[in-house]
Image (cartoon, rainbow, N blue to C red):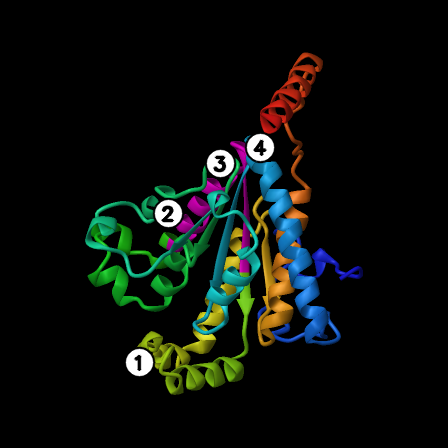
Amino acid sequence: MSNFKIEEYRYEGKNTFNIKKAETRFKDIYDNDQEYEIMQAAAAHELDDLQSMMYAHNRYGLLLVFQAMDAAGKDGTIKHVISGVNPAGVAIHNFKRPSENELEHDFLWRSNMVLPQRGTIGIFNRSYYEEVLVVKIEKSILDNVQRLPPELLEDREKLFKRRYKDIRNMEKYLHHNGFRVVKFFLNVSKKEQGERLIERIKDPSKNWKFEEQDIQVRDRWDEYMEAYETCINETATEKAPWYVVPADDKKNMRLTVAKIICEELHQLKMQYPAVSKERAEELQRFIKVIEDQNKA
C-alpha cells in the first residue's frame, strides 16, 4: 500500500461529499490472497504497536465510529482490523434500538457513557449518528418513541440542524480533551448489499441476523443515501473527519480501514515514557538480580 493516499477517502468539511459520485468498489490493492494475508498481518502488527504506545503514553484516546447500511461489513471489518490488538486496549460497543432507560435520557447519553479511556481505542458499531440517519428517515420514531417536548417537534428541520451542531460540539470537546474521533462510512452498493442479504438468508449460521425491516429499508434506499450525504457534510471536520470507504470488496475495505487507523495514530504525538538515568541504572541491577535467581 505504498501508493495509499489517505486524502482519497477523507472528508473534513472543506470538500463536499456527493453520495452519487462516491465509489463503492475500487482497484485491488493486493495481487492475490497470499499477499492480502501478508498485508493484513502487517497492518494488524502495526496497529498493535501503535496502540501499545498509546496505552503506555496514556495521554490520548481514540474513538472509531462505524456507520453503514446493513450487510456492508461493519462486524467483519472490526473483527479483522482489531484482531491483532491487545484486548485490554480496545472496547467495542454495538448500539441497537435504545432501551427504556436510554430513552429517558438525551440522545448522546448512551454513547457518552461508554466513551474510551485514555490510552485505549473505543469502537462504536453504529453510534449516536443513528439519531440523524434512521431517526430522520423513520419519522414515527420521533413521534412515538422518543420522549421529546411537543414544541421541539414543530420544526423537524431545525431539530436535526441542532443535532448536527450538538454532535460537532461533542466531537470538538473530545478533541480538546485528547480524544481523537475518526468516523467511517462503509459505502456498499444497493446491488451488492442485496446479494449479501440473500446469502445471509440462505446461511443457517447467519439468517438469524436477518430482519424483514432490512427489506423495508431497501425500499427507501435513496432517502437513506441522502441522509448519509447530509450527515457527513454537516459533521465532517478537520478534528473529527469522515472516511468514505468503498465496501463492495471486503478485503480491500479492511486493508483500507486498517491503514487509515494507523495513519491517524501516527499523527498523535506519542512516545513511550522516558526512563531517567538513575532508573536505567536501577533496571540494570534488576537484570543482575533476576539472572542470579535463575542460577539458584
Residue that mark 2 sits on: 111
Q: Earlier in the sequence, mark 2 or mark 4?
A: 4
Q: Which residue is mark 4?
A: 56
Q: Which residue is mark 1?
A: 212
Label 2 to label 4: alpha-carbon separation: 25 Å
> Within the magenta stretch, is there residue 116?
no
The disc, 2 or 3, on the residue closer to the chain's N-terminal end is: 2
The label nearer to you, 2 versus 4, is 4
Find disc 3 in the rendering and name its residue: 173
Residue neighbourhood size for the residue with mark 1, other residues' Cα within 10 Å, grouped as few (<14), some (14–19), many (≥20): few
Q: In front: 217, or 43?
A: 43
What residue appears at the point 57 percent right and 59 percent down from the top-left corner? 81
Lower sequence index among marks 4 and 3: 4
Q: How many residues crowd around disc 2 within 10 Å: few (fewer than 14), some, or many (20 or more)?
A: some
**Callout 4 amino acid:** Ala
Q: Secondary structure at mark 4?
A: helix
- Decide if residue 9 is on the left or right side of residue 215: right
Residue range of the region highlighted in magenta in the rendering = 160-184
**Element type at mark 1:** helix
